[in-house]
Amino acid sequence: MTKILFLGDVFARVGRHLVRDLLPALIKGLGVDLALANGENAAGGRGLTGPIAQELFGYGLAALSGGNHTFGQKEANSFLDQDPRLIRPANFPDPCPGRGWALLEANGIKVGFANLMGRIFMAPPLDCPFRAADRLILEMGAAGAQITIIDFHAEATSEKKALAHYLDGRLGALLGTHTHVQTADAQILPLGLAYVTDVGMTGPHDSVIGMGVPEIVEHFLTGRPTRFAPAEAGGRLEGVLLEFDEAHRAVSVNAIARP
C-alpha cells in the first residue's frame, strides 16, 4: 500500500506554521510515504518565494504545486526553473518558466505529480486543461510514473467534475484546489480515479478564505479596492490522504482536518 498526503492551499505564515507543527506527526502517525501541497498562497497569501519553498520542503513536503497566483511574486520567473520540486499549471501558454509536472518517488514507487488550472471564472484564461491533461498523462507514463496525480486549481465545480470523469480510468487521482473550502465528496469514480472537488485550505479559517474579515466585508459593501491582509486566527490544516494498492490503483481517498 502506498499512502500519499496532499495538503490544501498553504496560506501565508499561519499555513506554513501549521505544516511545520503538524506535518511530521501526520506523516508518522498515518504512515505517509509522500507528502505534497499546493503552495501558491504561501507567501503572504499571494504567490511563493524561493526561501519559503525551501522552508516548506524542510518541513517534509516533497513537492509544491501552484495556480493563478503562481507568478504573484516577481522572483517566480527565476526560481521556478531552478527546482524540479516546484510545478505550475501545465496549461500556461508557451513559452513559460517552470514545469507542469514532477516525477517523485514514494517508497520505491514512481509518482507523477502534475498541475493544471481551470478556465471558468479564472484569470488569466489558459490553454484547455482537458487537452493538457491528455498530454500530461502521456508524458508521465513515458517517464515511468506508476501512480499519477493532478492538482486541478479551478473555481467551478462543474469543470472539476467534468475533468474527473474525462480522466477516469487513465489517472490515479484528480484533486481540486483554489476555493479553500473543503468539500464532502471524496470518492473513487467507477473506473478507479480518486477525486475530491476541493481539498480545503491549510491556514487561518477565522477569515474569508484566508484573508482578514473586515477588509473583505468592506470591499463587498463599497465595491471599492481594499488592501487585504492574511488573517491570523483559526488555524487548521486540511487535505486528503490517498491510498493506492500494490497494482497502483486508488483504493481510498479521505479528507483530513487538523486544528
Image (cartoon, grey):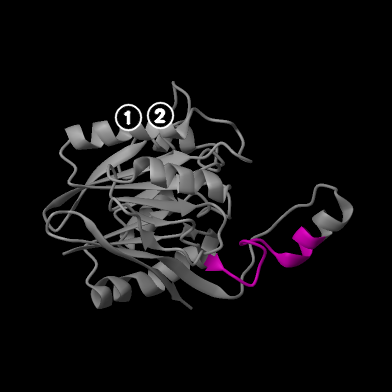
* Amino acid at the residue labelled 1: Arg
Which mark, residue 135? 1
Q: Mark 1 and mark 2 in contact? Answer it, CB < 8 Å.
A: yes
208 falls in the magenta region: yes
Q: Nearer the viewer, residue 54 or 163?
A: 163
The residue shown at (31%, 73%) is 26
Q: Mark 1: few, some, or many residues within 10 Å (few <14, many ≥20)?
A: few
Name the residue tied to disc 2. 131
Residue 163, relative to residue 105: is it above or below?
above
Q: Quadrant of residue 44?
A: bottom right
Residue under the point 44% across and 37% down? 89
- Percent of width and height locating residue 133: 37, 35
Q: Position of residue 189 (x, y in %)?
A: 35, 55
Residue 55 lies, with reference to residue 214, above or below; the image says: above
Quarter of the figure with residue 125: top right
Residue 38 sits inside the magenta stretch: no
Give the structural element (helix, strand or loop) at label 2: helix
Farthest front residue in view: 190
Question: Residue 157, how many percent across, how many down?
Answer: 55, 51
Near-viewer residue (79 or 68): 68
Q: Position of residue 215 (x, y in %)?
A: 77, 60
> Marks 1/2: CA distance?
7 Å
Q: Quadrant of the N terminus?
A: bottom left
Instruction: Report the side of 221 relative to 71 (left or right).
Output: right
**Magenta segment, which residues?**
203-217
Label 2 sits on what residue type?
Arg
